[in-house]
Image: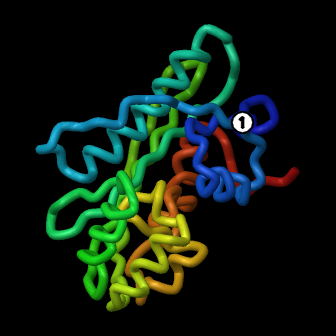
Amino acid sequence: MNDNSTRRIILASTSPRRRELLASLRIPFDVMASEADENTPDDWSPDRIVESLALRKAEAVYGRLADASQAGIVLGSDTVVVLDSEVLGKPVDEEDAAGMLSRLQGREHLVYTGVACLDLLSGARLVRHSVTRVKMKALSPEAIRAYVKSGEPADKAGAYGIQGLGATIVERIDGDYFTVVGLPLSMLSDMLSEMGIEVLTDP
């Protein structure tokens, strides 16, 4: 049954990129910061990391809303970059960002994004992930410094974003573009459909 009109989506993230992507689906949603701990054991695989953190973020918001008897879906998401089996998260400073970009330049790497959906009323959950292969251009030290100085790498896994200025440093991708941005919309729409919310429906 399609009950889009009575159930809302709560995005457990303050990421402007995820907010813009979710808005493109034209489904009303609210935003609530998860404030979840994003630390994971060093021996976890990338898919386990992104799925676990996506669920952890959704559960953090779910825990604050579960007693409100509200009909809706809490949505959590997490993204990491993987180079030579090493997980690269968000850079801690500009030097760290430059180091990540120096390692990534001219090479292929994988981007994993996990998505978790939690039903506020039933507690039902779906957790999945998507993977995209990315080839970054060969970059000069000057280009890396200029990109870091733009400020764009600061809050992004692997120290770059494929949208915006970061589009100029990516040579090609093999897979879902939106996985690299941080919210795989096709996979998400399938998950929402399974939970009773249809993205493509008559108004």
Residue 177 in the figure: left or right of residue 107: right
Whether 64 is drawn above or below 55: the answer is above
Residue assigned mark 1: 30
Whether 126 is drawn above or below 90: the answer is above
Residue at point 27%, 80% (across, down): 108
Residue at point 35%, 43% (across, down): 51
Whether 56 is drawn above or below 158: the answer is above
Q: Which class describes the residues within 10 Å of circle 1: few (<14), some (14-19), or many (20+)? A: few
Residue 57 in the figure: left or right of residue 45: right
The N terminus lies in which quarter of the figure? top right
Q: Nearer the viewer, residue 182 or 174?
A: 182
Q: Residue furthest right?
A: 203
Residue 131 seen by the camera:
no
Whether 145 is drawn above or below 152: the answer is below
Point out residue 154 in the picture as x, y percentages from the top left corner.
Answer: 47, 58
Residue type at the position of mark 1: Asp
Point out residue 198 in the picture as x, y percentages from the top left corner.
Answer: 68, 48
Q: Give the quarter of the image for residue 71.
A: top right
Point out residue 112 in the picture as x, y percentages from the top left corner.
Answer: 35, 59
Q: Nearer the viewer, residue 59 or 157?
A: 157
Look at the numbered disc 1 and give the secondary structure of its residue: strand
Residue at point 39%, 48% (across, down): 128
Point out residue 138 in the picture as x, y percentages from the top left corner.
Answer: 33, 91
